[in-house]
Image: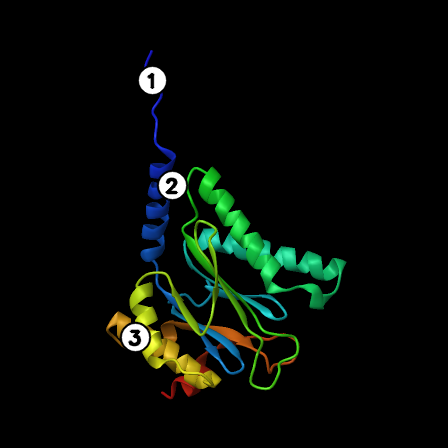
Amino acid sequence: MASPYYVAPEQMMKDRAEYARKGIARGRALVAVEFAGGVIFAGENPSRSLYKTSEIYDRIAFAAVGRYNEFESMRVAGIRLADVKGYQYDRSDVTVKPLANAYSQALGAIFMGESKPYEVELLIAEVAEQADGQDPGLELYHILYDGSIVDEHRFVAIGGEAEALTRALEQRWEAGLDLHAAVRVGVEALSEVAGREIPEATLEVAGLDAGRARRRFFRLRDEPLREALGR
């Protein structure tokens, strides 16, 4: 009788991680940049309808890279979770940390138990309900394909060329940026690493602004985006 095929658990986890990293690296990168009023997300995305960024709830935003169908299912699940909690309790009770933990647990379970890991990385952000002057009360969490979760500050790059983008952002970022300056920092870093100027038509720029009424999420397109870029 033939012996069953055996793979050491350490090797299996290594192979799964390598598989997920390669899948994520094939996609276009995305950056998040903190500014005085909140955070912006910027990335190259030729599609005008298949977004990498989204509103989850009043003060919470979602951004992702990797396989679209996989991170879209995570986005929809997050919206449903937030909606249920807001309906059962109060809208102010919906906060980012429990949502980030739920995403972390879900991705960790998939990484360990499913036939293949999800090829995604997520960013979840929240600005405070009451902004304190220049402090937006920002929380920003980076969730990896294996469920690992990191509390990020200032800026973060995910997807392909993340290390090169982080270095480019480090050179440009400074405290107290306004919204337009933060957009330029993110887009300039993306353009530098890509080795070309990224056309406005293929840019996806969104974020959270603590100064907005109730719903803090916004998108920049067309004239507002050109104004932010100074083009």
Front label number (3 vs 1): 1
Is residue 198 visible in the rendered image? The answer is no
- Residue bearing mark 2: 13
Callout 1: SS: loop
* Residue 191 - label: 3
Of circles 2 and 3, the one toward us is 2
Read off the residue under disc 1.
3
- Amino acid tagged 1: Ser
Task: Choose the circle earlier in sequence order: 3 or 1.
Answer: 1
Horizontal relation, residue 94 to residue 148: left or right:
right
Residue at the (33%, 64%) spot, across then down: 162
In this rendering, would 196 be left or right of 46?
left
Tell me if label 2 and label 3 are in contact, CB under 8 Å.
no
What element does badge 2 sit on?
helix
Q: Residues within 10 Å of mark 3 (few under 14, many from 20)?
A: some
Label 1, residues with CA under 10 Å away: few <14, some 14-19, many ≥20 = few
